Image (tube, rainbow, N blue to C red):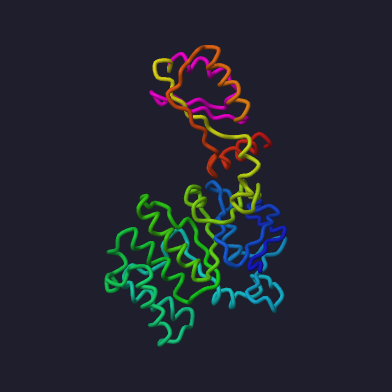
Amino acid sequence: MEVVQLKEVTKVFDGKTVLDRVNFNIEEGDIFGIIGQSGSGKSTLLNMIIGFYEPDEGKVLYQLDQNKKPREVHKHIQEIKKKFGFAAQISSFYPKLTIKENLFHFGKMYGIKTSVLKKNRENLLEFTELLDHKNKLAEHLSVGMQKRLDLSCSLIHKPKILLLDEPTADLDPVLQKEILYIIKQANKQGITVIIASHHLNDIEHICNKVALIHKGKISTWGTVEEVKKPYLQKDGAIHLRAGKHHQAMIEHVKRLPVRRIIDKGDSLVLYSPEIQETLYQLVDLIRREKITLEDLDIKKPSLQDIFESIVQEKETMY
């Protein structure tokens, strides 16, 4: 079931088009990543889905019951508040309240009965590993704990859909993994998750579907495999070590069809838009120059590589 549908969604602020005819669908159970640079329209897109902004053109639809027709988000804000959860990039908890007080406050805002709220709170404290810290003031928490508190506040009412804006921003790699683990566990409990982020490595590892947005337009969207497929036979990186032939190899590979060459001192990385052709020419070069390689490895493009390629292609069009 498609729980969220965007159809030709356009949003304009002060005469500037921030979102331009955006189309994609999010299915129940997805972890859906919205990828883009700062200022590309990611946060505006989340605000449209949650109903904070009304589209100037097009429709943002949601459907949580297959027996009911899709409805426009901005026309049913009260239901959206009950069924959607949202954690902004900037923390929304109250620093002068403890963890358990924050959760109780947000639960009451959602209109949850006290008996149900206390049970939800205890479950969440255990789920996010905040139980031992429940009486600490939010302002005294570590950055990682504050992120977990933010997530807890957005989950206190057991939403069907959870929207997260840059959930791993400003976190070290260990804390990033902790937050991503909590998100995955929430998804396993039946929550559809929508993440806006520029941390593409995180997105690639946690999301099953992505939409790449650039200057307010969706460049491509679909499963991670579908988005990457057109680039897997072309773009890629060749990692090689030529030992004593290292310096000579640098001059040789400049004649190959490569986009970029990185010299790492004891190895080279060749980025090519036509990986197979580059590899054929490299093999021919090695035979001709009688060079012995110590190591050769071919790596397929990551989501980060693909996004950079798309952005570069789009930039030439403006």
Whole-percent x, y for residue 10 in the image: 69, 57
Whole-percent x, y for residue 191 in the image: 53, 69
Whole-percent x, y for residue 27 in the image: 63, 64
Give the residue displayed 27% in from the left and 74% down from the top. Answer: 135
Residues 125 and 216: in front is 125
Number of residue marks: 0
Give the quarter of the figure containing the C terminus: top right
260 relative to 168 in the view: left or right: right
Vertical comparison of 37 with 92: above or below = above
Q: Would residue 58 be counted in the magenta stretch?
A: no
Give the residue displayed 49% in from the left and 67% down from the top. Answer: 188
Q: Is residue 22 visible?
A: yes
Q: Would residue 258 be counted in the magenta stretch?
A: yes
Give the quarter of the figure containing the N terminus: bottom right
Residue 313, image quadrant? top right
Give the residue displayed 37% in from the left and 50% down from the top. Answer: 173
Whole-percent x, y for residue 257 in the image: 60, 23
Q: Is residue 16 visible?
A: no
Vertical comparison of 4 with 252: above or below = below
Residue 282, image quadrant? top right
Q: Which residues are magenta?
A: 247-274
Vertical comparison of 140 with 300: above or below = below
Vertical comparison of 215 with 247: above or below = below
Residue 65, image quadrant? bottom right
Residues 105 and 32: in front is 32
